[in-house]
Amino acid sequence: FFLMIRRPPRSTRKESSAASDVYKRQAMLDLALNEKNMPIKLSEISQRQSISLSYLEQLFGKLRKQGLVKSVRGPGGGYLVAKNHDNISVKNIISSVDEQIDATQCGGKENCNEGHQCITHNLWTTLNSKILDYLESTTLDELVKTQKNKSENQSIEFATNKNNSVSNKMGAF
């Protein structure tokens, strides 16, 4: 006999909020990976990440107000990361537009069971704490390094496979 705890489905607003969190991280990571001391146009991020340009314009306005990015006007303008990548946590990025990170059904109000705390409230509260700790300890710099390592490994793997196929063909001669 198994006890299965299943969370009720979240509202559409919360699902779009989760998608929004993904877009924020993708956009900030894309900017950090590609800026190289030159401003990046939102249209470039839009193309690379398949995120609507109008959404990116709204998002970067909020990120700019929070001091995470800065805009450069004029020809060759765009956006740059405003702080050292080590000083921006994933939690900073996600919460930059006042969205709460919360796994509880009640938003921490302890009223999810007819005005009272549900029996799994402590489980979800503990999960919240662990998620927030992890997101606070993970920096944009770590994400950039991970992505660069991943890209380098794929390049090395491609080069190795290419060399193997060339040497295999040459061995047939």
Image: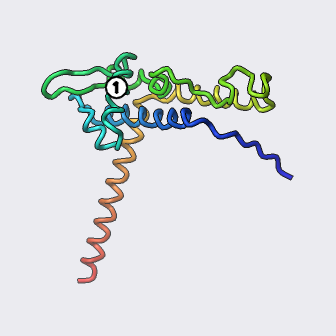
Residue at x 56%, y 30% (from the top left corner): 134
Q: Residue 123, percent across and down?
A: 74, 31
Residue at x 86%, y 53% (from the top left corner): 1
Residue at x 25%, y 36% (from the top left corner): 43
Asked if residue 1 lies left or right of residue 112, the reply is right
Which residue extends farthest right?
1
Number of marks present in the image shown: 1
Q: Residue 18, percent across and down?
A: 52, 35
Quadrant of res 75:
top left
Q: Residue 20, percent across and down?
A: 46, 34
Q: Nearer the viewer, residue 9 or 146?
A: 9
Considering the image in quadrants, where does the C terminus appear? bottom left
Mark 1, other Cα within 10 Å: few <14 / some 14–19 / many ≥20: many
Asked if residue 115 lies left or right of residue 134, the reply is right
- Amino acid type at circle 1 is Phe
Q: Which residue is mark 1?
A: 60
For the residue labelled by badge 1, is the local secondary structure a helix, a strand or a loop?
A: helix
Which residue extends farthest bottom?
173
Quadrant of res 166:
bottom left
Q: Nearer the viewer, residue 144 or 166?
A: 144
Q: Residue 72, percent across and down?
A: 21, 21
Q: Nearer the viewer, residue 42 or 26?
A: 42
